[in-house]
Amino acid sequence: MDKDTEILKPTPHHSKSHLNLALTMTGAVLLVLLVIIFLQNQQLKQELNMIKSPPKIQITSLTSPTLSPAIDPTSYWKTYRDKIFGFEFKYPSEWTDKYEFDSFQQGNLFYAAEVGTGKQEGERSGMIVSIPIQTNLDAEKYTQLNYYTKDEDKVVESSDRISQKKVGNLNFTKLLRCSLGCAEIYTIVNKGYVYSLNFIAEEKTIDQILSTFKFTDGSQSNEKIIDANFTQDCSIVIKTSQSNIRLITGFGQSKNSRCYQFAYIRTSPSGQFVAFQDLSGGIDSKISLYSLERKSTFGLGVYGTSNVFGLEFLPNDKLAVLTGYKDTTTPEESLTIFDIPTIISHISANFPNPENLYGSYNLEPFMTRPDLTGLDHVYEFLSITTDSLYLKDNQGVIGKKFDINKL
């Protein structure tokens, strides 16, 4: 071997470094793998737990909204209110009030019906209220005697015609009457008066109207007439519980009149009316009436040159007027009973000039004339007790006696 030739041997230090590096890299890779495996293992556990025990979902309870009270279908209806007979009810706003005078002559108080519907008159819905009538019967007996006839109307069996219907705290007697169509008549008695309501309408509408029917206390005002008298100038001063009222009469136009010495003036038991002898045109006898509720004076009748013999209110506020002539061979007298509550409440309220009531409208439906035949001489005075009305002469002799309940 040449001296110049050098044999190079591997250095032991370099071999060891390469080994260490390899080991380090291998350890790092294993560590990363372990971390990855650990994290995957944790994620897998969480997923398994969710499958076994899913998270609770919080459900918020849904509370039903508060419902508003049901709207009363009659809240926008019209109201009929009668202050004299003391009752009221509601009826559909689309019904039109009818105040034809013929209706009052037939004894009807109120009439309303639907209009503009294109229906024939007999097909339209409506109702009629009769003028309340005094009675000592109950509603069923009154209905049987005044409305029910066994031989009429074969459409409905007689056993089904009359029935009872309770609405609220009121008990009505119902009559179903059929001819070309069917009508339902409901009657009820209150304080000695029978009230009759006649319907041509759907059952639902009738029930709604009846549900609003109620009795009131009559006059809505507490004011009452305490006293009424003629003055020396022939005006009238009415003293009420709240004020004083002065009325001008026809006597005031007559010079040297001493009306306060002879003219009749009476206050009704209810304290709502004053009736008085008056003068028309300066010469004719006249009966006038003041209504506290209406704050008006009404003429009831002019009697020409005849004398006013008597003027008295009955307990139910009807007015008895006795007129006639003195010094006649044959008695010429007339007794007239005016139904004052009905006249004032249901005629004067519906006509434009109630002061001109007499002569303008027929008052006959509200007047009765008891029979005075058989009188042997003139009886110039009226006298009244709790149950009777008498005609007497100037000696106190009774010429006629009438039962007040029948007048």
Image (cartoon, rainbow, N blue to C red):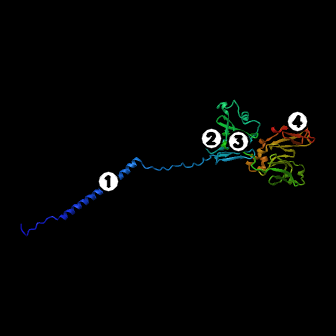
Q: Mark 1 points at which residue?
A: 37
User: Residue 149: horizontal and vertical position, in percent?
Assistant: 70, 31
The image's mark for residue 374 is 4
Alpha-carbon neighbours of circle 1 within 10 Å: few (<14), some, or many (≥20)?
few
Helix, strand or loop for disc 4: loop
Residue 225's label in the rendered image is: none
Earlier sequence position, callout 2 versus callout 4: 2
Kind of residue sitting beneath label 3 = Val
Q: Mark 2 points at which residue?
A: 204
Q: 407 above or below 76?
A: above
Mark 1 to mark 3 CA distance (whole Å):
98 Å
Q: How far apart are marks 2 and 3 (CA)?
A: 18 Å
Q: CA separation, marks 3 and 4?
A: 39 Å
Residue 393 x, y percent position in the rendering:
91, 41
Task: Residue at 33%, 54% (x, y): give it.
Answer: 38
Q: Distance between the residues labelled 4 and 1?
A: 136 Å
Instruction: Classify 16 as above or below 363.
Output: below
